[in-house]
Amino acid sequence: MPTGGLTGMRVAFYGNICNNLFHVARALRQGSDIDAHLFVDAVHDFQMQPESDDPSLKDNYPSWIHKRRYMYPWVRFAPWVSPLVAELRNFDVVVVSSNGPLYAQFSGKPTFFWVSGADLNVMPFPFDFANKRRGVKAHLDALLTAFWQRRGIRHSTEIWTQEFLPFEYSLEQLRVRRDQIAPVYFPLIVDPAIVKAAPRAELEADPQIAEIRRRSDFVVFHPSRIMIRTNPALPRARALVETKRNDRLLDGFAQFVKHGLARHPLLVMPERSASPDLDVARDLIARLGIGQHVYWARPPVALGFPRSELMRYYTVADVVADDFGDIGWFGSVAVEAAAVGTTLISHFDERVVSKMYPWHPFVSAREPGEIAAALERLFRSPEERARRGADGKRWFASFHSPAGAGRVYVDRFVELARRLGLPSPRVVPVPLATAS
């Protein structure tokens, strides 16, 4: 049940991919009297737990964060029996990501699907990605999840997404009505307290960070998952979501190394189980002859680093590299790099991105030669790196901080309250300066 003494509209959030909804809920509570609550499934991985971003929350959740088990084996057959559904019915509005549409469709409340990626592009299409699973149980789970996910997406009051090709294709395949797709862009929110530069003492105490600083005079940090292979049998729009084309980065970095501008360049990548193509990357690194210039950072658990620890690597990097696939989209890596003030190289679909922002500070490159040229230019020009880093912090404060992006959500929920006949939320001004 909602608690906390607030009197505004009540909003439930579930499906906390990369803590996205945690930050949205918190921004709404800071910027309005909206009674926002986050529901966290105890079986979800640690990257969906708020303490991954804010360690002070471990075993210390405020009253508006609720953590328990909601997904049981039998729930896939009848999602309405999940205890989550009973919780959602106590709220005015429900916002979901991940597998949230399975449950929200049975809440009887206006439901808004905040698309994060695989929840729209992969989960509803089990046959396209059948080669990723092993065993009868895994296939049955995928089929049941897909059935309810597809139904939940179609029953959503509104879908919050972007115009990138895979999203557009998936919505078309699901026969979603165009009037269900919100015309407003809903940005990621990241807490600047989490992504601030790590204290010098903390960096010096981390043996991996110390080794990186000792070994290199130019650090390229690549925190993205390693996803290189694609299924040629899939339609292009579907196959694109399987790859980040890390091979293009490895090839481009090898060209940069070969040109000999930096004496000790180092490409740093997390060695984590969430990367399906680690072996492919290792083979390519060996063929390119750059093994001595690659450092595999070892996370505390196999799945990867908590964001609070990952930010140390952004801090010591000269350049961050993200996604070089053909989609041209972006996610948390771009926002985190901007927040820290480290220059980012990635591939951007400028046609779509220009509709989302009036400007951005990133270097766009896709092919290996373009990546190598960008690395060479940035190595030669610390001034450009500093300028882009400063622009990144300004871009982050305007568009992705709790104050900057929080305004988008507060305004949207004020509009939703008016549309749904709910009490209008009271807005609490949050100075933009507090987000920088």
Image (cartoon, rainbow, N blue to C red):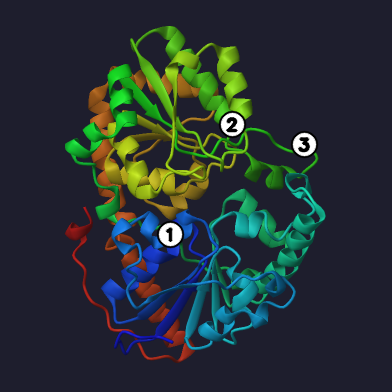
Cα separation, mark 3 vs mark 2, equals 20 Å
Q: Amino acid at mark 1?
A: Asn
Q: Which mark is residue 76?
A: none
Give the labeled residue for mark 2: 278
Q: Along the horizontal axis of the image, is 39 left or right of 166?
A: left
Q: Is residue 221 left or right of residue 366?
A: left
Residue 349 in view here: yes
Query: Is residue 314 placed above or below 251 in the rendered structure?
Result: below
Lower sequence index among marks 3 and 2:
3
Q: Is residue 382 above or below residue 122?
A: above
Pair 1/3: label in front = 1
Query: In this orientation, does residue 175 appear?
Result: no
Instruction: Tell me the element at label 1.
Output: helix
Residue drawn where x is 51% and y is 66% of the image = 42
Q: At which x and y percent is residue 313?
A: 34, 36
Amino acid found under the numbered disc labelled 2: Leu
**In front of the other: 404 or 267:** 267
Residue at horizontal 66%, vertical 82%?
81
| Picture quadrant of residue 212 | top left
Query: Which quarter of the figure has residue 69?
Result: bottom right
In the image, is residue 58 above or below residue 208?
Answer: below
Q: Secondary structure at mark 2?
A: helix
What is the crowding at mark 1: few (fewer than 14 residues within 10 Å), some, or many (at least 20)?
A: many
Question: Is disc 3 surrounded by few (<14), some (14 to 19) or many (20+) residues within 10 Å?
Answer: few
Secondary-structure class at tag 3: loop
In this rendering, which labeled residue sits more in front, label 3 or label 2? 2
Tell me the residue that label 1 is attached to. 19
Q: Position of residue 270 (x, y in %)?
A: 46, 35
Q: Quadrant of residue 315?
A: top left
List the residue tagged with mark 3. 232
Residue at 56% over, 55% down: 163
Task: Tell me if mark 2 has few (under 14), some (14-19) or many (20+) residues whose alpha carbon lies within 10 angstroms of its own.
Answer: some
